[in-house]
Image (cartoon, rainbow, N blue to C red):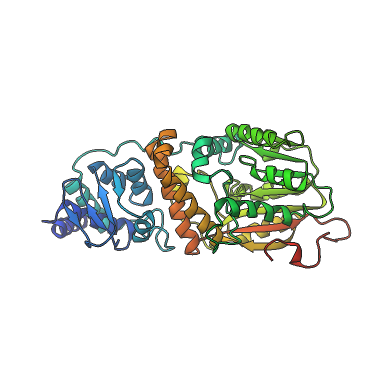
Amino acid sequence: MRLRHRTQRAADGQLAGIGIADALLRLLEMVLAAEPTIRVRAWDGSEAGPADAPAVDVRSPDAVRYVAQEPNELGLARAYVGGLIDFEGDVYDILRALPFHDDEHQHARTLTVRQKAELATVVARTAGVGRAPAPPPEEAVVSGRRHSKDRDRTVVTHHYDVGNDFYRIVLGESMVYSCAYWRAADDPAYGLADAQRDKLDLVCRKLGLHLPGPHRLLDVGCGWGSLLLHAATTYDVAAVGITLSEPQARLARERLAAAGVGDRVEVRVQDYRDIDDGPYDVISSIGMAEHVGEEAYTEYAAKLLTLLVPGGRLLNHQISRRPGPKREGTSFIEAYVFPDGDLLPLATTVGRLEEVGFEVRDVEAMREHYAQTLRAWVRNLEAGWDRAVELTSPGRARVWRLYMAGSALGFERNRIGVNQVLAVKPPAGGASGLPHTRDWLAGS
């Protein structure tokens, strides 16, 4: 008890006589374990920090209470999503000034006795007595066994059933919610729709849909049907797509019917674990495996292997994290964007595919492409901000802007990556059935 009183008095002395904005700046330093290069403007009109730095407005003592409850990025995210913290100017400038994306800064920090005492003093000086509000309604609430079918369906509903019209604002008319392929990024006339078309065609070519068939395609996690639509209209294939989102499936069917290919492309609301109508000649899994979870990944890989004919191909497109231990605590993205999502190192993904019997034939890293894609989505969201808020909520629009902008910086800084892995189910005799060079792959 004597040590606690001594550290409390030291904290009181260090903060005595400073304004609320100065105390808030010190709070950020403790939470970030680094000195933020921002200017803080408090609800009482006080300001602190460099005059030319990006400015953050802290609008209510409840923002402090959120951070006191969760002294990490989750606490700050709750305050931002709830509208208690806001900023002016470029979202990327703010995120660069708050180093959440540096490897050494963890989601959840373990504060020392002295830091806890100082934190309590800051909260008392700025927010007084009071409990933090309930988390914003945009925060996910999930229960049940992790990666059970029911829980996975709840998670997908949280993320994807925001509304097709909202996603159309963000994604554009291509309605592709995965990394684009910017083949002509330096051409000012080349935009997001072009890059997404080229990504879809890259996937089709890696699967060999332009080579002699047959080519019965399964698209696992088909979204709004964009890959199915491209494969059916460009390469004349029959296909099945699955998703856990009923609104996605409904729009996908409408798009396919409008293109005149609804008679040979089926879209189901179905868990990948329940598919029983194989074999398929080729399987695409684009931006879906991040939802599978590390503990279920071997089951996922084995299931796809059983669904392929011998010599059949899998194109697995998946976000990855850097090697090393997982970051601790609940992140903003886990709480608000992808509950139960799991990013694996590329070596883990390749290893699991090989362990169940796949032969990995080609790997392409595309992280710079995803950074550019995310920046395009952020521009779309900001341009359609009022309509996006009308369709969802101010908090939901804030979630998407924060997660997409933060992810763009993560890809640019090589904190996360994205890779296309082409694998084959080896036939008897061992021949892969693939051409001997990469010349047949688009973009080579």
Whether residue 331 appears in this view of the structure is: no
Q: Say which residue appears at 37% left-offset and 51% top-offset.
A: 73
Asked which quadrant contains residue 6, the reply is bottom left
Q: Percent position (x, y) of residue 267?
A: 69, 35
Asked which quadrant contains residue 138, the reply is top left
Position of 112 compared to 213: left or right?
left
Query: How many numbered callouts?
Result: 0
Asked whether 356 or 226 is in front, the reply is 226
Whether residue 135 appears in this view of the structure is: yes
Position of 54 compared to 106: left or right?
left
Q: Is 239 above or below relative to 254? A: below
Q: Is 30 above or below relative to 337? A: below
Quadrant, the C terminus: bottom right
Q: Say which residue appears at 22% left-offset and 63% top-offset.
A: 50
Given the current orientation, which residue lies at the most extreme left position?
17
Asked whether 375 or 111 is in front, the reply is 375
Q: Percent position (x, y) of residue 437?
A: 77, 68
Position of 373 compared to 262: left or right?
left
Q: Percent position (x, y) of residue 317?
A: 63, 53
Asked whether 23 or 116 is in front, the reply is 23
Given the current orientation, which residue lies at the most extreme right position?
429
Q: Percent position (x, y) of residue 68?
A: 29, 47
Given the current orientation, which residue lies at the most extreme bottom position?
437
Asked whether 138 or 382 is in front, the reply is 382
Q: Say which residue appears at 42% left-offset and 48% top-offset.
A: 401
